[in-house]
Amino acid sequence: MTLRLRLFAMGALVALVAVAAVWLVAGRRVEGEFQTFLERDDHVRFARVASEVAARVARGEAAGEVATLLARAGPTLRGPVAWIDPAGRLLAASDSTLARARFSFGPGDEVRVTRQRRASGGEVRTETFAWIGLRHVALEGPAGAAAGTLWLFPPMSARAPLGGAAGGEAGF
């Protein structure tokens, strides 16, 4: 093999490796940007829903009216929204699967949701999801008293691992 042919082959190999590296990096970059876009979009939509809910709660509207608002807003968000009172009881939610769920709060912004779900074989499974740092808004009643908190949860997939976040997410 001549020197010229070897140099050409090496140049082609380097170019091929460079193109492959750029392709891999660009693919990850686009995927990351898309995820960031989805998260930002959810935060904007949640802010709109939260401001409407806060205004209604401040006016003293019943939990049923707020539940109707959340049910309408639910499909516009990737995950469920829940209004939880200071004692940890669910007052309204955009997702009916949270109706019988238990909510507990740990140090900082830790939130745990425990719910039971009937599996395909008929047995009842208990699922526990835990997150830290979820989006939330404190709500005040008509007299300025604490009326609970509105929480935006990530999607809670039926296939999520027990004790973890859904879909491999750790909460935004």
Image: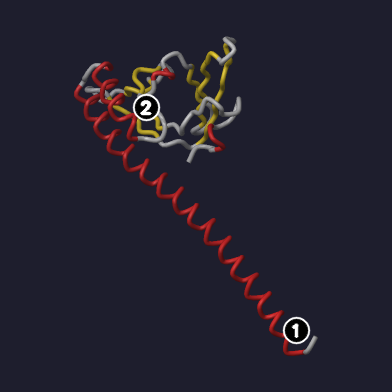
Q: Secondary structure at mark 1?
A: helix
List the residue tagged with mark 1: 6
Image quadrant holding the N terminus, namely bottom right
The x and y percentages for residue 165 are 55, 32
151 to the left or right of 59:
right
The x and y percentages for residue 53 are 27, 28
Q: Residue at x 24, y 32 (%)?
A: 52
Query: Viewer-proximal residue, 30 or 135?
Result: 30
66 to the left or right of 135:
left
Labels in figure, total: 2
Q: Residue at x 22, y 30 (%)?
A: 55
Q: Residue furthest left?
A: 59
Q: Which mark is residue 149?
A: 2
Q: Residue at x 46, y 32 (%)?
A: 155
Q: Is residue 118 above or below residue 56?
A: above
Which numbered mark, 2 or 1, is in the foreground of this view?
1
Q: Is residue 121 above or below residue 157?
A: above
Question: Which picture quadrant has residue 120?
Answer: top right
